[in-house]
Every structure is written in C-alpha cells, then in structure tokens.
Amino acid sequence: MVTDDIDRISQTRRPKGNPRGYQRWRHLLFVHWRIPVAELRRAVPTSLEIDTFEGDAFIGLVPFEMQGVRPAWAPEAFAFNFLETNLRTYVHVGGTDPGVFFFSLEAASRIAVTAARVGWSLPYHYANMAMDVRGSAIDYETTRASDPAARLEAHYRVGRELGASQPGTLEFFLFERYLLHTERGGKVWTGQVHHTPYPVQLAELERFEEGLVSAAGLSDPGRPPELSHYSLGVDVDIFDLAPRRA
C-alpha cells in the first residue's frame, strides 16, 4: 500500500466546466517496468517530480484504440478512430497533482499527430499500426514512420478480472491517472481527463518486442515487462490543457 501524503483522489473527480472533447479508449494493454529514479530524472523536466510507489519508479507502454475522437462542438458523425501507443512515467508537481509524463506517443492519424503537437505540445509521431482482436487474444503492432526501430509488437491474451483498482494499491497508482503534465515555454502545463475507473484484467504476454523505450533515449530494460494488465476501456471527457499558476 502506498502511504505518502499526496492527494490521489481529488483528481479522479469530474472537474468543473465543460469538456473540450470526447474520446473512447478501448482494448488497452498496460505493461510496466521498474526503473531507477536516477534514470528517469535525466529524462524528465526538473519542474516535475518523479512519482514512486513504495520507492519504485515505473515506465509504462500503453497500446490501445481510440474511438469516437471529436471536439465537443462536433457531432458524433464527425468523430474518427485510430490506434495509439504511449510511453510514459508517473510524476507529480511539488507533492500535488499526480499524473503522467509522456516520453512519446504514436498515432495512426496524421490529423491527430498534428493537432496534439500544435495544441498540446505533446511528442506525437505518425506510425503504421494494426490491431487484431480475436476473442481473448489480441495482436498489436506499431512502427514509427520516421524511425523503423521505434516499434512494438505485442501478442497477448486477456486473463482474470481484477475489477476497479482500490486506492492505495499499485494498480490504482499505475492506472488511475487523470492528469497529464508537460513543459511548454518554460512552464508546466496540466491537462485533465475524466472517466469511470478502469475495469482491469490481467494480461498474459505471448510475444512482446519493442524499441520505443530506446527511441525515447532511455536505457533498454533488457527484460520482459514485469507487470501486464488489460482494460476493455472507458469513455473519456477531455478538458483543457492550461499553464499552472506560479
């Protein structure tokens, strides 16, 4: 159980105001490795603190499908779908607002890549991607168009249901993240999403090869992921990215 003094509950509540957009995240695979804090410290902006669980820091790869992506003003008929994969770690801002920091994001949509780079200053890359769902067996592949070594091939099987993650557990620490932090113009910007808790299941990796960690400038873990989980998905409201007050 995590026993620090960081508030990890308030950001799970729906924020005030209207969403900026809507998305549906489906067939999410969460794989994680423990990684030395010093390794992350060299790669994460100094304005952000590395978040840890019982002293352990983590990097995660999350391949999934985005459905129904649209701004709030657009009707569902104009929504579009694409595959996405993010490489991330977990951070907080001076003991508050635990969230994620993205090293890279792959997307099979040039529109999404351009919009996220311009509007959110996030390190998106266009990639050739494919996913095949056959009952409990899922195949997922991605190769960055500008760097074929930045790739992922995952063949896995969905396992036992764990349900929603409980506060204080490692699963809650890893999955229930509703804030993203990025650095833009020398300032920390924070964005928020809202959704119901992830329905979590175990995942069994039958084949897993990746080059995204090294492509981000991090040391290759040199070992299979230590933790593998799956979620069928959640419906997501997207709120604004904004600079933090000093």
Image (tube, rainbow, N blue to C red):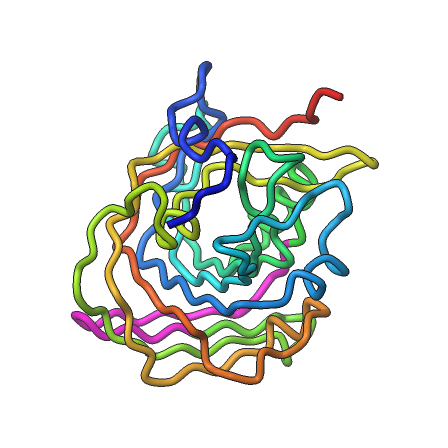
216 or 48, nearer to the observer = 48
194 or 171, nearer to the observer = 171
| In-image side of 60 versus 215 (left or right) | left
Q: In the image, is residue 138 part of the stretch drawn in magenta?
A: yes
| Screen quadrant of the C terminus | top right
Residue extending farthest front: 3
Q: Quadrant of residue 82?
A: bottom left
| In-image side of 5 versus 79 (left or right) | right
Q: Position of residue 45 (x, y in %)?
A: 75, 48
Residue extending farthest top: 17
Residue found 61% across the figure and 52% down from its top: 102
30 or 64, nearer to the observer = 30
| In-image side of 59 versus 194 (left or right) | right
| In-image side of 55 versus 13 (left or right) | right
Residue found 43% across the figure and 26% down from its top: 10
Residue extending farthest right: 186
Residue found 52% across the figure and 37% down from its top: 179
Residue found 39% across the figure and 72% down from its top: 140
Residue 8 vertical placement versus 39 (above, below): above
35 or 83, nearer to the observer = 35
Q: Position of residue 191 (x, y in %)?
A: 57, 33
Q: Position of residue 165 (x, y in %)?
A: 29, 47
Q: Position of residue 228 (x, y in %)?
A: 36, 69
Q: In the image, is residue 38 part of the stretch drawn in magenta?
A: no
Span shown in magenta: 124-140
